Every structure is written in structure tokens, then in C-alpha cells.
Amino acid sequence: MATTDDIKNSIVNNHPIIDIRSKTEFDGSFDAKYSFFKECGHIPKAIHIGDWNELIDMESNRLKDIEDIKKIWNELFEISDQNDIIFYCGTGWRSSIGFFLANMMGLKAKNYDSGFYGWSYYAN
């Protein structure tokens, strides 16, 4: 699991911080904002890779092919097994799908279970 300090270190060291929420959650325009969130938007330097459901084949209810996901991710950020990749969403459950896929790819990955909720409360 990633901590808020891990996120802060990743920001400073330019390690990938991956946002796996909807585009409107990422850009702060989400209409149905969560009442318990202090603010909206994203963690600084976060990379939006699309919503979690883009990792699922909705017809079969299975994860999409790992090689296809890796190809898409390589277009969005540099995949490296040298640095931790931290995945986050609002509160940690959606990002666990990205975390799981990254681990299946053999990458060093962590899930920031506090998500943007924790970041908005504890990091600022």
C-alpha cells in the first residue's frame, strides 16, 4: 500500500502517479461530487489513464488482455520496473484493479488506498 508520504515522494521524483477515475473526477467537473470530499480535482502530476471500467471487458466481465493494457499505458506514461507506480482513485477500490494488473505485468506497483479523499484531507 502507498502512503501519503509515498505520493509526495513520487511527485518530487517524477515517478508515475496514476489516476484511474473518470475524466470528470480527474478534472474536477464531476456533477455529483461526493459530499464527504473536501475538494475535487487530482493529485499534482497525476496521469489520467481512463476510468477503471476501461480495464474490463464488459461483455465477459473479465480483465482485458494484459498486453493490450500495457500497450495503452506505454502511450500514456513510461512504464519502468525501476520505480514504483502508484495507482489511486477516490477511495482506493477502483485503483486496486490497475494495481493488480501492474503486478501481473511484473511492475513495482502500489495502491494508494486513501485515494483522492485522503489526499484532499491529509496532504494539503
Image (cartoon, helix red, strand yellow):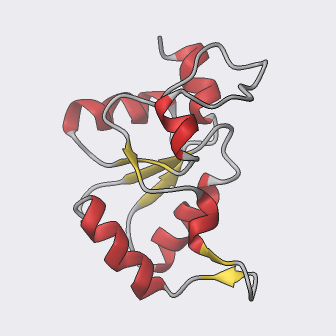
Res 70 visible? yes
Is residue 81 among the parts visible in the rendering?
A: no
Q: Residue at image x 49%, y 56%? A: 50
Horizontal side of residue 5 vs 89, given as left or right: left
Q: Up-down: is 37 above or below 44?
A: above
Q: Nearer the viewer, residue 112 or 98?
A: 98
Question: Percent x, y for residue 5?
Answer: 43, 28
Residue sitting at x 78%, y 18%: 35
Q: In the rendered view, would you say 26 is above or below 51?
A: above
Total numbered circles? 0
Identified at 68% across, 38% down, the residue is 91
Name the spot of residue 21 as percent of width and height, x first: 57, 47
**Residue 38 place in picture, x, y as percent:** 65, 13
Rendered image quadrant of residue 52 = bottom right
Answer with left or right where residue 91 lies relative to residue 46.
right
Of residues 54 and 118, the one drawn nearer to the viewer in this rendering:
54
Q: Which residue lies at the image location 41% right of the left edge and 36% below the top edge?
A: 6
| Position of residue 73 measured from the top left corner of the image (x, y, whole percent) | 35, 67
